[in-house]
Amino acid sequence: MTTAYPDPVPLSSTEHQVQLRRAVIASTIGTAIEWYDFFLYSTVTGLVFAKLFFPHSDPWVGTLEAFAIYAVGFVARPIGAAIFGHYGDRIGRKSTLIATLLLMGLATFAVALVPTYERIGIWGAVILTVLRFVQGVGVGGEWGGSVLMSMEWARNNNSRGLVASWPQFGVPCGLFLANLAVLAFSQMSGDSFLAWGWRIPFALSLILVAVGLYIRLGILETPTFSKLLAEQKIDRTPMLSVFREHPKEILLSAFARMSEQAPFYIFTAFIFSYGIGSLHVSRDFLLTAVLAASVLSFVSIPVFGHLSDQIGRKNMYLIGAVVTGVFGFIYFAMVNTGSEPIIFLAIFLSLVPHDMQYGPQAALIAESFTGRLRYSGASVGYQLASVIAGGPAPLIATWLYSTYHSATAIAVYILFCAVITVIATALMTDYTGKDISGEYSAQ
């Protein structure tokens, strides 16, 4: 039997469905735009930044230095989660989402204007670091709001996995757009792309932000937050309260993401430096392969989100973690054959184990927190993984390969992440199909 979210202002079934569609579309498109910004930086880091901002370093050292700046964005994400989580639970999901979109878009546009080492020396890398930090703050606050904007409009408790997976769909969308933009402008003749062509995709972010703002301004606040507001149940210090009331849920959410997030950035960011430097395949070949992988995710993320409504959030997630732990060895065995068709297939399939977790992940984490603290709790739990998984992953992969000269060491690291995920997920409570619109204490 399903339970409906209560609406503070009664809406007809048709009106509610219209608002649900608008919320899902606004969340998905807005998230795609923000992840375009974030992934664009990731892609260009492996291709351009080491050469332009650390030109006097050994190639692998320069790559490490470039990925260190890249990792700053992940360190900033929990800070963004704390800031925007607080305001998301205080003033609402909609207003906060508009602020994160502006912050992210303007920081990305500014990257297009940063002078290289040749012009201002090390200060170019310093400015990049600051802008990457701002990007991280913006995307850190984005995820929780976009997921809740969709999920809290879902009347049917047995469809939350599918509904909440659509903002997750924005990730492969952003990955696709970022790689497509880089691929398109990398066709420029001579060294034009390295000289100035890489800046154009960053500048285009300004147009995408305008589109995202137009869409997000047209949606209503979620029924759950509106109900909390009407009943005067808004917490004055949601961030402090969520750490006091839900410390276990925050930690488990972070550790549950280890095998989803760390391999993702190995498969979509580290592969560019590894593929060009060690496998000796072309930049365009790698961009095309990652593009194809992101298109496959368009289908697999909502499919696995829907499956989690059928077999349970935890069950789906655990299957994905186990598959990821095994797939790391298969992936590097395939890419190390040196055969371009096999390398392409490995990259094309690389995001499926990730999607088995990413599809149900939004609902799994968000359901763990009570309504009045959900933006804060879900955001912080989700984004803490950026510090322990996503940010360090390309750095760790680069260090492991340069130290052991074997990709097997990276596969072992992926397996280690999977083991942590399995333990953390097993300890989480599964709220699949249960009413989460009211106040409760997670057990």
Image (cartoon, helix red, strand yellow):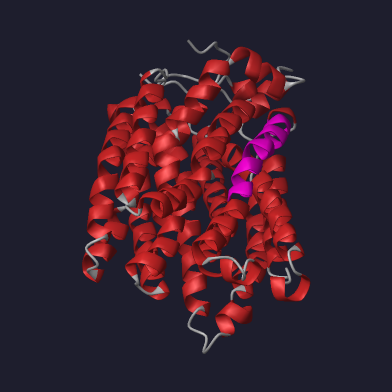
Which residue appears at 56% of the width and 44% of the height?
23
The residue positioned 54% from the left and 56% from the top of the image is 64
- For the residue pair 3 and 355, the one nearer the viewer reads as 355
Which sits in the foreground, 250 or 311? Answer: 250
Residue 374: x and y in percent read 59, 26
Main SS of residues in magenta: helix
Spot the residue most to the bottom: 189
Q: Is residue 351 shown left or right of residue 256?
A: left
Q: What is the magenta range?
A: 71-88
Which quadrant: the N terminus?
top left
| Left or right of residue 378: residue 313 | left
Q: In the rendered structure, does residue 249 fall within the stretch colored magenta?
A: no
Vertical position of residue 210 compared to residue 418: above or below: below
Q: Where residue 283 sits: x, y (%)?
A: 42, 73
What residue do we see at 56% from left, 80% from top?
Answer: 193
Image x and y of residue 26, in percent: 57, 50
Q: What residue lies at 36% left-to-right and 34% top-to-bottom?
A: 416
Quarter of the rendering containing residue 262: top left
Image x and y of residue 427, in percent: 40, 17
